[in-house]
Amino acid sequence: MECPFCNAKREAILYDDGIIRILIDSYPANRGHLLVVPGRHVESWEELSGEEKAALIRGMELAMEKLREVLKPDGFNVGMNLGKAAGQTVPHIHLHVIPRWEGDCAHPRGGVRKAVLDLEDENLSLKERWEKNRLSREEVERLRKAFGG
C-alpha cells in the first residue's frame, strides 16, 4: 500500500517543517479535522524519536491554535489509534485533531471514550457525512494562510 501521508497531495498539506506535517483529513469526522503526522514513515509510537514525539505534541497545539483562529470551535477531540486492534487503518502513526462545536452531535458525552464501544463508525459508512464535513475552498485557504502558507 502506498502511504497516503508520505505521498500526501499538495493541497492536503497545511504545514511541513521536515519533522512533522499537518494534513487535512480525507475522511473528516467533523469540519476542520486535521492530522499531525511525522514526516518520516513510522508505523508505531515506539519507533518515534523523542524529537518526533515532542514535535507531534507541538503540531497538535499548532493545529488547535490555527483551527481556533479560523473556524472558532468550542472544543476538540484529540487522539491516536495505535495498532490495528485500536482501529489504525493507515500504517503511519498519526494524531487526529478534531474540532467540535456545541450541538454538532446529539450525544457528545464520552467523547473519545466511545471509541472502545462496539459501534459501527457511521462517519465512514455514510459518504455524504464526510463529504459534508469537508472544508470549503475558502476555509482551506484561510487555514493555509493561518499556517503561514
Image (cartoon, rainbow, N blue to C red):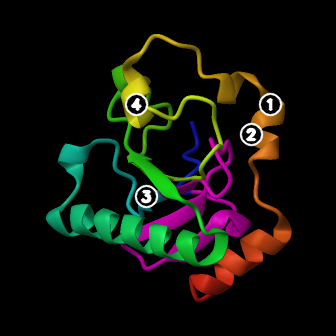
Q: Secondary structure at mark 1?
A: helix
Distance, label 4 to label 1, CA atoms, is 24 Å
Residue 129: say if magenta: no
Q: Which residue is mark 4?
A: 110
**Spot occupied by residue 3 in the image (x, y as percentages of width and height):** 54, 46
CB atoms of marks 1 and 2 within 8 Å? yes
Q: Residue at x 43, y 80 (%)?
A: 17
Q: Which residue is mark 2?
A: 130
Distance, label 3 to label 4, CA atoms, is 25 Å
**Spot occupied by residue 71 in the image (x, y as percentages of width and height):** 65, 68
Q: Residues within 10 Å of mark 2 (few under 14, many from 20)?
A: some
Q: Tell me the amino acid under the disc marked 1.
A: Lys
Q: Residues within 10 Å of mark 1 (few under 14, many from 20)?
A: few
* Quarter of the rendering containing residue 60: bottom left
Q: Residue at x 62, y 41 (%)?
A: 29
**Spot occupied by residue 49 in the image (x, y as percentages of width and height):** 18, 61
Q: Tell me the amino acid under the disc marked 4.
A: Gly
Q: Tell me the amino acid under the disc marked 2.
A: Trp
N-terminal-most mark, 3 or 4: 3
Residue 37's tag is 3
Distance, label 3 to label 1, CA atoms, is 24 Å
Residue 13: say if magenta: yes
Q: Quadrant of the C terminus?
A: bottom right
Q: Which residue is mark 1?
A: 127
Q: Which residues are magenta?
A: 7-35
Of residue 30 and residue 13, the one placed in the foreground of this image is 30
